[in-house]
Amino acid sequence: MSIRADKISLQIKKQEILKDISWEARSGQLSVIIGGNGAGKSSLLKVLTGQWKAQEGSVHYGNKTIDQYTQAELALKRAVLSQQIKLTFSMSVLDLVLLGRYPHVIHQVGRKDKEIAMNMLEKVGMQDFAKREIFSLSGGQQQRVHMARVLAQIGDSSKAQALFLDEPTNSLDIHYQHSLLDMAKQVAQEMKLTVIAVLHDMNLAARYADYIAVMKQGQLIQAGTPEKILNATLIKEAFGVESVILEHPVLNCLQVITYYS
């Protein structure tokens, strides 16, 4: 089902963070939110996931508002990979991924949960690290393990509707940036999920996004397919840089070259 924001406005300490945002992300698609620092991208994501409540407007999961779900029900509806994840104590990689299964567990973690966890570790290329302590891994490796955790949360749930990724490519090398976003797009298509990601890299957005929303100073200034909205005028408005938009010489997508003058 689609995830829809209807006239969302958010204030924090009397500062307007989001201003009258209406936007819809559809199932089976990877929708990407881009914009400069302080544009409100992560704030919008927090409202869409239910972590923050907007003063005005509403968030809809299909035909129901997010307020109509309990926290337990929401945990089955959507999974969230946050930008900053702080662990207070170490645990094995497998145990961390199994945390994603807890919304599904009635009494204790079972064989099926462990199979799903290992399958998701394999998807992110971390299956050989299952017994390692999470703090012994690099930042990029830890990010991949957390991706496996949120995938495990929605791994076999017929109730799952959405996957939210807040700057998921941070700390990842180029190979795993592409691998993770390719995986996110596949998950959207195969499971008919609504996948929403916050990204900084316009070329990653152009390569993988089915739909892009561009934000500036808490407002949604443009939304549409990469081919329809990515142009030099919009990039100048949103990011304050000049750009040249080209057809990628190999891939069937746009390539954005930016420069400052």
Image (tube, helix red, strand yellow):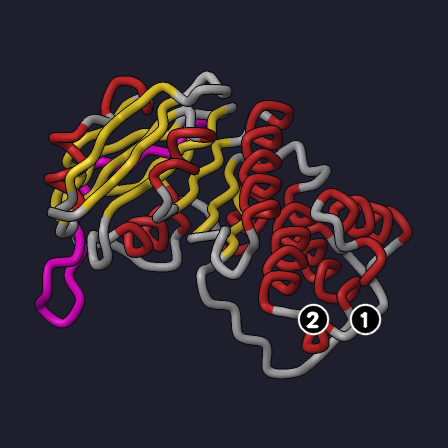
Q: Is residue 210 above or below residue 133?
A: above
Residue 242, x across and y down, in percent:
15, 39
Up-down: is 71 above or below 224? below
Residue at left offset 72%, top offset 76%: 136
Residue 4 shown in magenta: yes
Residue behind mark 1: 132
Is residue 210 depicted above or below 153 in this figure?
above
Q: Main secondary structure of the magenta part?
A: strand
Give the camera-side residue of 254 and 150.
254
Judging by the rendered image, the residue that carries numbered circle 2 is: 137
Is residue 127 part of the magenta span, yes or no?
A: no
Judge the density around disc 1: few (<14), some (14-19), many (≥20) Cα neighbours within 10 Å.
some
Tag 2, which secondary structure? loop
Do the residues bearing badges 1 and 2 touch, measured as CB atoms within 8 Å? yes
- Judged left or right of residue 63, residue 118 is right
Q: From the viewer's perspective, is 108 left or right of 240?
A: right
Residue found at x 14% / y 44%:
219
Q: Secondary structure at mark 1?
A: loop
Mark 1 and mark 2: Cα distance apart in space: 8 Å
Magenta highlight range? 1-18
**Above or below: residue 162 compared with residue 27:** below
Left or right of residue 26, residue 43 in this image: left
Q: Nearer the viewer, residue 12 or 252?
A: 252
Q: Is residue 64 visible?
A: no
In x, y percent, where is residue 245?
Answer: 26, 26
Residue type at numbered disc 1? Arg
Image coords of residue 103 (percent x, y): 66, 54
Q: Amino acid at mark 2?
A: Leu
